[in-house]
Amino acid sequence: MIHVDPFTGKLSRTQFNAKSRWNLTSGSAFKSTIEEQDHKASVCHRAPAKPASIAETGLDQTFINDLILKNVLHLGDFSIQQVVDLVKLPLPIVEKSLEELRRESLIEIKGSTSLMKLSYRYAVTNSGRNRGASLFEISRYIGPAPVTLAAYWKVVSRQSVMDISLNLATLKKAFSKLVVGQHFLSRIGTALCSGRPIFLYGPPGNGKTSIAETIGSLLPDQVFMPHALLVNGEIIVLFDPATHIKKDVLEVDNSADQRWIAVKRPAVRAGGELSLKSLDLNFDPISRFYTAPLQLKANNGLFIIDDLGRQQMDPQELLNRWIVPLEERKDLLTLNTGSKLEVPFDQLIIFATNLQPQQLADDAFLRRLRYKICVARPDLESYEKIFKLACHHYDMLFDPEVFDFLVASCYRPSSFNFNACEPRAFIEHILDDAKFNGAVPQLTKEKISEAWRDYFVHT
């Protein structure tokens, strides 16, 4: 098993032993010792501690001063608390920066309702506006102060997907809306507990994407992620509101570093639009800062590569890109300057494809995908269960006579295979027809025949 040293960022291997095991049947999970597991769980749920000094932020005074100046440049007048809310740094650090900016005549005090500093109103001076304009030429990033890459390594390590604990009861509950067998659940559960990539393959329309998304809903707990990283003087924006779901926080934890956000474990999905470029740092020449690639946004969570083989590139290129990250759980990214940075690669990756694994990758890569699970077409019994679930979902009465008619009169003569996606499509067709005709939707032989006729291509 591979572990990351949270302080050095280096990886090491630990030997598997009797105390390092997963027991899926009983629902118990043991890694290292029980005491170590309990300690790690308690640490994982805590936000990083608030920095007590500038040194503890990992940033230097000049960087903080410049960031504050850019944040307040277009505010008019502002208070200390407004700055704290913008840059997410503790009050004493912000006070020191504002005092330095004032001594340099970049900001000035415009007024106060008392002698307390918290009541001061500040404004940017002409010199400050000129200085701010020059800073924007270097980088237009404004917002919360970034964290260092070393701090990011440490937090990602302590909330790793390798330490997620699941049991069979949890899996059954999550997959209750899908028709899957217990043997399949056990295979999925074993794969999930490993934290290793999962390769889902099989004919289209049989639930690979639904299974992957259900796995995403299973990921427990919240994790903490920074708004942005500072690496070699460059800003990399990590938090993405379109991808990451903030956890509801009833009250602010005054002991926590506010540069970190509590989010639901990420579940990032990419399909045919995925390209090698989207797996690299994206530098915007106008804003002059970077946005994180998809795999960095997915850290501590799930990354679904859907429709593998349908991307506008050779799938072998994509798979080769990840041979080292999958093995060593770290990735190398490149800045525009040519500098390389080593970042954590801590996510559960699910590859979903309609193609056979041998069509996509060679043996060297396939052996790294230890869990290759076929999502096959349903048999008649399973297909009937899926049909019943679809009827129940849409509040339509299931009629066994109509179902038998569908199988005997439509599927059998046409020699069509059952696909898990078809019952929902047929039921939705009947609902659409009823809506158009102002009728009550009913499962009848006539309506199911019409749905069959419109769904399939008939030559």
Image (tube, helix red, strand yellow):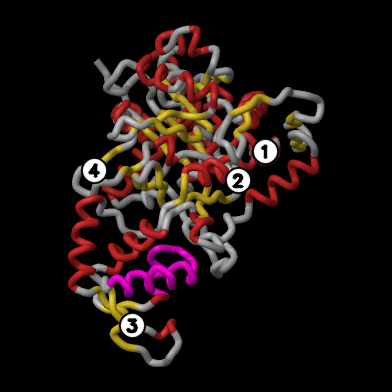
Task: Give the answer, above or below, for where 27 lies relative to 12.
Answer: below
Give whichever of 348, 169 is nearer the camera. 348
The residue wearing badge 3 is 121
Sequence-earlier tag: 2 or 1: 1
Task: Give the answer, above or below, for where 66 lies relative to 413.
Answer: below
Q: Residue furthest bottom?
A: 114
Is the stretch drawn in magenta largely helix, strand or loop? helix
Question: Which disc, if any, is residue 232?
Answer: none
As drawn, is 352 to the left or to the right of 11? left
The residue wearing badge 1 is 166
Sequence-earlier tag: 3 or 1: 3
Which structural element holds mark 4? loop
Question: Which disc, if any, is residue 220?
Answer: 2
Which structural element holds mark 2? loop
- Distance, label 2 to label 3, CA atoms, is 44 Å
Task: Give the answer, above or below, for where 430 lies relative to 316.
Answer: below
Label 1 CA crowd tier, 10 Å (few <14, some 14–19, many 20+) = many
The residue wearing badge 4 is 284
The amino acid marked with disc number 3 is: Arg
Please state the horizontal and vertical placement of residue 270, each as a whole percent of the image.
Answer: 37, 33
The amino acid marked with disc number 2 is: Pro
Give whichever of 95, 206 is nearer the camera. 95
- Distance, label 2 to label 1, CA atoms, is 9 Å
Closer to the eye: label 1 or 4? 4
Indicate the quadrant where residue 341 lies. top left
Is label 2 in contact with label 1 (beta carbons under 8 Å)?
A: yes
